[in-house]
Amino acid sequence: MIRDTIRRMITAAAATLHERGELELPADGLPTFDVERPQQAQHGDYATNLAMKLARPPKSREIATKIADYLNETAPLVPAYELVEHVETAGPGFINIRLSPKWLLRQAGAVIEAGPTVGNIELGVGKSIDLEFVSANPTGPVHIGNGRGGFIGDTLGNLLRAAGYTVTKEYYFNDAGAQIQKLGRSIEYYLRLQLGQDVAKPKDEKGEIEGYFDDETDPEDTFYRGITRTIMAETHDGADVLALPADERAAVIGKRAAGHVMRGIQATMARLNIQFDVFFNEASLVTTGELQAGIQTLRAAGYLYEREGATWMETSRFGDDKDRVLLKSDGETTYAASDVAYIRNKLDRGFDQLIYVLGADHHGYVGRLTAMAQMFGYAPDKIHVLIYQHVSLKVDGKSQRMSKRKGNTITLDELADLVGADVMRFFYLSRSADTHLDFDLALAMKEGEENPGLTVQYGHARIAGVVRKSVEGGFHPEAEALAADLAVLLADAPEQLTAELALIREVLRLEEIIERGALTLEPHHLTKYGMDVAAAFHIFYDRCPILRAESDAVRGARFALTLAARTVLARVLTLLGMDAPDRMDRPTE
RNA sequence: GCUGCCAUAGCUCAGCGGAUUAGAGUGGAUGUCUUCGAAACAUCAGGUCGUGGGUUCGAAUCCCACUGGCAGCACCA
């Protein structure tokens, strides 16, 4: 990576100056310093604050000058530093590094040759990560809130893979426990209704209606009745299941219904290109005995105790704010019990890190998860929890909490029908996970027509169009590009050269974007970057004729820039889980 | 009460302790197609970075308090 080279160069310069006695360093060596992209292009390609870390102004200015002078002397002599054009100092002691235009342009070939692996780095090579996201209960369709976790998780996984990690994308289905019974009773109600029986909706102990139902105020909401029809078709109009003893009935129907819901969720995920390697079922923890084994282990380790008839685990010993109930007073396991078994299952699979992408309503989970890992003897820093803030729905300019009861829930499928998967992905991924997402449907639909993400796709399609046209005209873009010497572009008109250099600079930033996204677990930088690359290409395209370039040599060089841009745009779109189209339908006037 | 998150242009949002002009998209104004795709490009207008302190040579960025908003604090899942 370019930035690493710059950093090594600066470090070496400081060391050499120190040996010569021209630079004082603290006893514990070089302080940590930043190598960053200045906000303003006139300050060069990279800037470092090393001198300011070593001393305060005005002394920092002296140090900066010493280092800059040294670099200017040595850079031309060291082959590895050929990327540097000039080093200068500015302000309170910044060292600004300007890259060589010739060197920059010549990187295009390597980008094209890297193809779909462009931007890959080795940050995580040899490390494995389990990445869990969505994990919505199989009791109903996934809504636009679950979608946020889905898009963030999926793209984060892609990003981590690009950074070299081995990533398992995982979905945990809570297909055991009370909510499945509840689902069973709800479907049983609909079954009996279908059969013309006189039944009432199921109720809890307090006599309140409890379960999962279609919204009766919305004639299009037939989700649970649809599931019911499917089950009727499978069970001789329900006869097979309704004949069961009462205590088994809810479980059997619930399990069957949950299976259908799960397949529906999987279809929704597939449609949105949210990919998973593993769909893990909570129920399997029971059948394999892992649930009981986990409890045994904790008991043997002395982390369990009885209080008020229930069995608790001492998670507070490991930093959780309170202890958690493992077994209820009626002997049933809690959700936390499954969590314990599941986290152990994951850790025993040998992952170096477990990442959870969770909604803001789960932020109290962090302490509990790390405590659980420690109870099994694993280090707490193996657990990383990425919290995304909630999605609320904006109706008539007012945001309100989504509520099935109020009939203002939107499912992911409904939204995908309206705007399409690519628009959704870009819309969601443009925002940091920390921001509250007020989903304005009217705005999303408008953005669907005029979406920044489409500009990125259009950039890719536009390039594909140029390539098509070139081939039709008898040219060989790829061969010409790889044979070209881009240094010929240095003779271009200033306005053109500026656009060409801006484009290659943008293209070469991909590795840094991937590194940053992987280190901070923030996939949203990719969308911004995609727009930057697309914009750089569009400006280049506007100023620099490709096919009609003034000479064969210039044409070849511009083919190289064009194909490098295509390579990076395709990669970014793929990381974002979007299509990289070769053509797009023209918008209607 | 305790914990986490948010407040930046009309709107939706970036902004990785820095550089006398804080960015993008969108919306507004005005130009640019007999030319490789105008879903593009160019120019202009638009901001007390919620408020008040503090740390620092330097704060939208770090710390504290406050205001407003969201979420959580179950023998629910």
Image (cartoon, coloured by chain):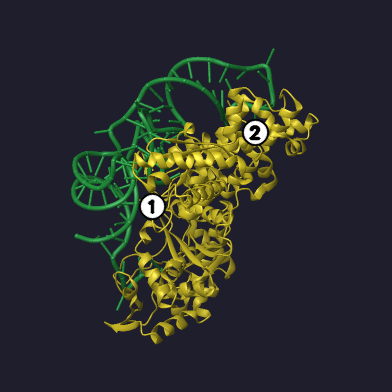
Chain colours: A yellow, B green
Residue lying at the far front in this picture: please name it: A21
Identify the residue under disc 1. Answer: A390
SS for tag 2?
helix
Residue at (36, 61) in percent of width and height? A363
Residue A214 in the figure: left or right of residue B6: right
Label 1 neighbourhood size at 10 Å, few (<14), some (14-19), many (20+)? Answer: many
Q: CA distance from mark 1 to mark 2?
A: 36 Å
> Which picture quadrant has residue A183?
bottom left
Name the chain under label 2: A
Residue A340 in the figure: left or right of residue B7: right
SS for tag 1?
loop
Question: Where residue A174 sits in the image (x, y, percent)?
Answer: 47, 68
Whether residue A588 is visible here, answered yes or no, is no
Q: Which callout, 1 or 2, points at the residue further toward the start of the chain?
A: 1
What is the total number of numbered labels drawn onto the structure image? Answer: 2
Question: Where residue A539 sits in the image (x, y, percent)?
Answer: 58, 28
Name the chain under label 1: A
Q: Classify A499 as above or below A306.
A: above
Q: Amino acid at mark 1?
A: His
Identify the residue under disc 2. Answer: A462
Q: Are marks 1 and 2 in contact (CB under 8 Å)?
A: no
Of residue A17 and residue A504, the one placed in the foreground of this image is A17
Question: Where residue B49 sits in the image (x, y, percent)?
Answer: 30, 38
> Which picture quadrant has residue A332?
bottom left
Residue at (64, 33) in percent of width and height? A462
> Which picture quadrant has residue A84?
top right
Question: Where residue A375 sits in the image (x, y, percent)?
Answer: 40, 77
Q: Quadrant of the C terminus of chain A?
A: top right
Q: Classify A359 as above or below B19.
A: below
Callout in the foreground (1, 2): 2
Q: Amino acid at mark 2?
A: Arg
Q: Classify A29 as above or below A441.
A: below
